[in-house]
Image (spheres, rainbow, N blue to C red):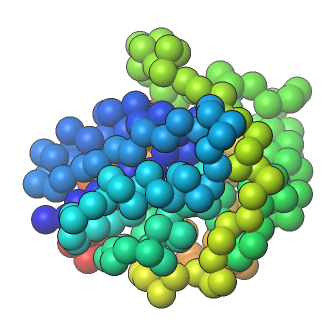
Amino acid sequence: MSTFVLVPGAGGAGWYWHRLVPELERLGHQALPVDIREDDPRLGLPDYADAVVAAIGAHRDVILVGQSLGAFTVPVVAGRVPVELIVLLNPMIPLPGETPGQWWEATGQPEARELNDRLNGRTGEFDEQVHFLHDVPPEVAAAGASEQRAPSDTPFGQPCEIGRWPDVPTKVLIGRDDRFFPVDFQRRVAQVRLGLTIDEMPGGHLVALSNPVELALRLDGFARGRL
């Protein structure tokens, strides 16, 4: 079976994966959620990659899963240690040398979110409840309130230190109900930046919290080569 190394998004809380880990283990896999202190301004993208490499250690048959901002870390890691597969989950897919701060304007994410909001009768600025937690069970959201970390500004000014995307099979899996990175936006970015079509599943931006059973099944299918 595979070892899934789970790289969180902004904030770096390994808690994000706590509902997915037992589902992957139930399917016979090992799951290693990485906790990264992204609220520490002394740490940046190179340190995040170091933390993931350390978590991998001597593990083999590794599948790297990068959520959102984690997509800036996984290709760097895949260039340093052997991995079988990269899975990008509602990702910020970087170009070589691009910073996370540049990514928003370069991809047109703000405009895509605002258009999607208007088309669906939502108005106003980003709202955590509306764009992140709308499909997360209330009890899960409440339990995670103390686990959240505001990311520091440090990584947003640092380039993704890859010369090109690593020569590793890559899947882009998105929650079709993502209000932060709408499905049409993700489809375009994956095609333009990686030449890949997306795989879709039910769920929003925080799909590991809202739909962990289905997510585990999708990841299991990737690992077994069925999807």
Q: What x and y, as percent, mark residue 110?
A: 85, 48
Front-most of residues 19 and 168: 168
Give the residue at x 51% y 59%.
Answer: 49
Q: What x and y, as percent, mark residue 4?
A: 29, 57
Give the residue at x 28% y 67%.
Answer: 62
Give the residue at x 77% y 67%.
Answer: 98
Q: What x and y, as percent, mark residue 204?
A: 55, 41
Front-most of residues 36 and 85: 36
Instruction: Check the image and report above or below for 225 versus 64.
Output: below
Give the residue at x 44% y 51%.
Answer: 51
- Residue at far bottom of view: 167
Whether residue 132 sits left or right of residue 216 in the image: it is right
Image quarter (top left, top right, bottom left or bottom right) of the N terminus: bottom left
Asked if residue 34 can be seen in this view, the reply is yes
Asked if residue 183 can be seen in this view, the reply is no
Whether residue 1 sits left or right of residue 119 in the image: it is left
Q: How many marks are shown on the rendered structure?
A: 0
Whether residue 214 sits left or right of residue 139 in the image: it is left
User: Residue 213's image quarter?
Assistant: top left
Q: What x and y, as percent, mark residue 38?
A: 59, 38
Image quarter (top left, top right, bottom left or bottom right) of the C terminus: bottom left
Instruction: Check the image and report above or below for 65 versus 76.
Output: above
User: Residue 11's image quarter?
Assistant: top right
Instruction: Check the image and report above or below for 214 versus 142.
Output: below
Front-most of residues 219 and 147: 147
